[in-house]
Each structure stands twice: as C-alpha cells, then as structure tokens.
Image: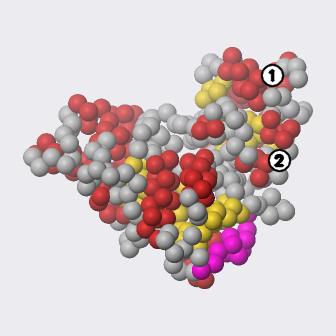
Amino acid sequence: MFVYLDNAATTKPCAEAVQSAISAMTENFGNPSSLHRVGLDAQLAVDNARKIIADSIGAESNNIIFTSGATESNNLALRGICSAYGRKRRKIVASSVEHASVEETLSALEKSGFEIVRVPPGDDGRFHFADFVKSCDENTVMITMMYVNNETGYILPVKETFSAVKRKYPDIITHTDCVQAYMKIPFRANTLNADLISLSGHKIHAVKGVGALYIKKGVRVLPIATGGKQEKGIRSGTESVPFICAFGSAVEKYSPTIKERYEKVSALKSHLLENLSGIDGISINSVDDASPYVINISVGKRSEIMLHFLESKGIYVSSGSACSKGQQSGVLKQFGISDKNADSALRISMTAETTEKELDEFAKALREGIETIRG
C-alpha cells in the first residue's frame, strides 16, 4: 500500500511537467542569455512559461521573475523592498503565522533595525483585516500576509486587508505568500491588491527548485544577489530552463480546472471528516472554512510516534510544515491550540488525485494506531 497525504510538503510532478523538463535538458538545452539560435530557443521556452504563469494570475509577462522557489521569492520580496524603500520607513506588518521563510527573514530584518509588528488572530481564533490596518502607520514600508496557512489551511483575509491598507496608506507595499493557494484557490493579482506575490513550482505538480515572484509594475525591488542581468537584473544567475518549462507545463495543465478540483477536494475533505468523526480522541484543528487541501487534526498520541506507525502501513502524512523538520513552528499555538494537542497534531494534505479509498485506509490505520500506541 502507498497512500501519500503530504501534498502541502510537495506534490508528485505531473507527466507534462516531467516531459517538459526532459525535453529542455536533452533538446532545448541552450543558455537563454546566449546570442545564437540555441540560446534564443531556450529564451523562447522561458518566455512561454513566463506568459503561462502570468496569465494564470491575470498579470503581464514582465511582472514575473523566476526564482529557485518560494523561499527565495519571499526573501527577495522582503529584503528587496526594504533595500529599496526602507531608509525612511522602518516598520513591517505581518501575520503571526507566516511560513519560516518569511518569519526568519523578518527576524533578520528586525535585528538590522526594522520594527516588526506581528498581528495575531483575535480572541475568536480568526484574523481580522481591521487589526492589520490599525497596526499600519506612515512609518510602515510593507505588509506581508500569507494567503493560505500551510499548517492548518486557514485562509487569511488578504484581499480585504490589502484593499483597506491601500485606501488608507497607498504607499505601503503589499506582499502575499500564495504557495498553498496557487492553483487551488482562484485569484487575480489586481483583485488581491497585491504588489508582490510569491509562487512555488513543486506544490502544484511541477518540480522542486523553481518558483516565481510577481512584481507589480512600478514597484521597485532591489536584488539580494549580484551577478548578471538575468530576470531584469532582479535575480541574477542562469535561468533553470528545464525547471521553468516544467513549471509552465504544470500551470498550463491545471489552471483551467481550479474550481472543479476545489470542489472535488472539498468532497474528499467531507468524506475524511465523516470517517474521523467515528474515532475517539480526535479533534479537528482546522476551521470549517479552511482550504480543503489541508486538514490539521490532533490524535491524542505524539505526532512523531504516530507518523512512524502510519509509515509502517505505507501511509504518509506530516506533523506540520516540512521546513520545520519535525519541530513545532508555534503556528498552532497562535491559533489557540493547546501544547498537548500541538504535540499530537497531524497534517493531512490532499490533491484532486487523492481517492476516497486512500482516505479510508488512512482512517483505518489511524484508528489502529490510536488503539495500539501507548503514551
């Protein structure tokens, strides 16, 4: 048996992405910066992928900068904006549940003299856009807020927050980490009122090692690495043509069916929750209106022990963000989840290719684990 339910960590590359990468490695292998025909062909392939990704969020091709992944995109967004605009404005507002690639970057900027305001959920366990607006002032250079939390699936009020912030403080730069929303929840850059959007390839059935940063026209981002003039001089280094082509192919395949896949995964979530409701000792940590792609539960047994028990049955889930390497990130505590429940938390993350049978096998093995594991 092989049941993979850790798709928030990474997804299996689709056949189209794999074929595009292979073709770029074996046939269209030129350097996009070379001035001869082989280089031009590679550049055309990159341009094609760039247009596909831009179209998917309602942007123009020249708004898209390719990176090595969302971690680099987030670093480039935060550090690049602070370098460009942070001499006079020294405050950054963020949610308290950001991915490590944002939170650790904020901590580094804090040590360099920036004021970081981390806005927590309200007493009801939910984020409210008014709390973010109240945290902003004339000294704020940017606000960063993830769209979908990678540990719980919670959907943050990005559109409402950014729109309200822009009405009151039009000069504040808005950034959203859309890794767990892209190709899962329909959105457009302009309707989000986002100046910067971070994207990742391997979360949407492309390959690891490629991401993108959307930069709105007129927004200045200074590079965090120097070198050549690739990617408009914002991200130096020879572009990874195979990975970029794979990224474009995955987006091209899945972009037309976002709503249909969301509905299918919502039905899978309902099926799973119905199965889990019959198992004693389980509590659901994800709110009802969270993204159906990510479900966080507590099982009453230590996460690490339960993970290995499930693995022995050929079932793969996680205890939280893969980037935390098994350590608690503190995100669950921010959502009001007790330390005891956080210690026994599991994250189940699906795709539209997940089946009810796989979820049934997971629930069956989970019940067995709860009944047999001591402590």
Q: The disc labelled 2 sits on which kind of residue?
A: Ile
In the rendered view, tell whether residue 315 sits above or below residue 341. above
Which residue occupies 32% across, 63% down? 62
In this rendering, position of residue 198 left or right of residue 119? left
Whole-percent x, y for residue 217 in the image: 38, 71
**Badge 2 is on which residue?**
337
Residue 302 sits above or below residue 28 on the image: above
The x and y percentages for residue 319 are 70, 35
Q: Which residue is at the front of the view, 232 or 12?
A: 232
Q: How many marks?
A: 2
Residue occupying the point 81% across, 22% down: 369
Residue ranking furthest to the bottom: 168
The residue at 31%/41% (across/down) is 240
Q: Provide the secondary structure element on which disc 1 rests.
A: helix
Q: Is residue 320 visible?
A: yes
| Residue 172 horizontal/vertical position (percent) | 54, 74
Q: What are the residue bounds of the magenta stretch?
A: 127-138
What amino acid does circle 1 point to?
A: Gly
Q: Nearer the viewer, residue 297 or 277?
A: 297
Q: Is residue 335 magenta?
A: no
Question: Label 2: few (<14), some or many (≥20) within 10 Å?
Answer: some
Residue 137 forms part of the magenta stretch: yes
Going by the image, does 273 lie left or right of 114? right
Q: Are marks 1 and 2 in contact (CB under 8 Å)?
A: no
- Residue 82's spot in the image, x, y percent? 49, 65
Please give the residue where the numbered disc 1 appears in the rendered image.
369
Q: Which numbered dot is residue 69? A: none
The answer to which image quadrant residue 165 occupies is bottom right
Quadrant (top left/top right/bottom left/bottom right) for the C terminus: top right
Q: Secondary structure at mark 2?
A: loop
State which quadrant residue 214 falls in: bottom left
**Residue 272 visible in image:** no
